[in-house]
Image (spheres, rainbow, N blue to C red):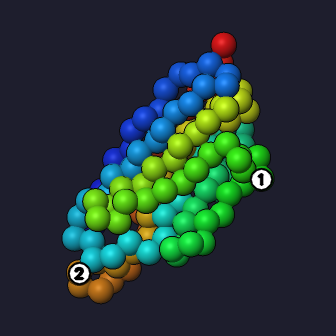
């Protein structure tokens, strides 16, 4: 079983920055793909940013140039640096991690979500 703990959400003014963190723990042999998704009230969950494999990064058009996803493989952590935040970035942000356990079974896990609110 994988536990994902997210942190870093909160209230920020438009134009401000936040850094989300996701820590994965458990009997993890290797993490393959990581991603951040978000869901605003009344909307479906959408992809914000993802790293499918080293050097392969994907961003939603609405966040390109403002958000940066990164990963710390040694510590099983994923980050989302969010700059120039806009009110439309307000949502619950979820971390997604995919990988392999030591027993060579695969996993696809989600964090509990962290609220990001952009408002003056």
> Where's residue 61, x and y in %?
77, 53
> What residue does disc 1 label?
61
Quadrant of image for the N terminus: bottom left
Of all residues, the one furthest to the top in this rendering is 120
Give the image location of residue 43, x and y in percent.
72, 43
Q: Please tell me which residue lies in front, 109 or 82.
A: 82
Disc marking residue 102: 2
**Horizontal arrangement in the rendering, residue 84 relative to residue 112 (left or right):** right
Q: Distance between the residues labelled 2 and 1?
A: 36 Å
Name the quadrant of the C terminus. top right
Give the residue furthest to the bottom.
104
Q: Which residue is drawn at 43% across and 35% down?
A: 8
Q: Which numbered mark, 2 or 1, is in the foreground of this view?
A: 1
Mark 1 is surrounded, within 10 Å at the Cα level, by few (under 14), some (14 to 19) or many (20 or more) other residues, namely few
Mark sitting earlier along the chain (2/1): 1
Q: In this view, does 90 lie above or below 33?
A: above
Q: Position of residue 54 (x, y in %)?
A: 51, 74
Q: Is residue 48 placed above or below 106 in the rendered structure?
A: above
Q: 49 or 98: which is nearer to us? A: 49
Local secondary structure at mark 1: helix
Residue with the most extreme right position: 61
SS at circle 2: loop
């Amino acid at each position: 079983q994988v536990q994902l703990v997210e942190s870093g959400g909160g209230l920020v003014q438009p134009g401000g920055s936040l850094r989300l963190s996701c820590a994965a723990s458990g009997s993890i042999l290797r993490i393959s793909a990581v991603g951040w998704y978000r869901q605003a009230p009344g909307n479906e969950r959408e992809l914000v940013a993802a790293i499918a494999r080293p050097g392969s990064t994907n961003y939603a058009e609405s966040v390109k140039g403002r958000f940066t996803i990164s990963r710390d493989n040694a510590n099983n952590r994923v980050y989302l640096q969010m700059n120039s935040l806009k009110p439309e970035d307000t949502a619950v942000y979820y971390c997604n991690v995919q990988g392999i356990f030591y027993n060579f079974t695969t996993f696809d896990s989600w964090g509990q979500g962290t609220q990001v609110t952009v408002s003056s």
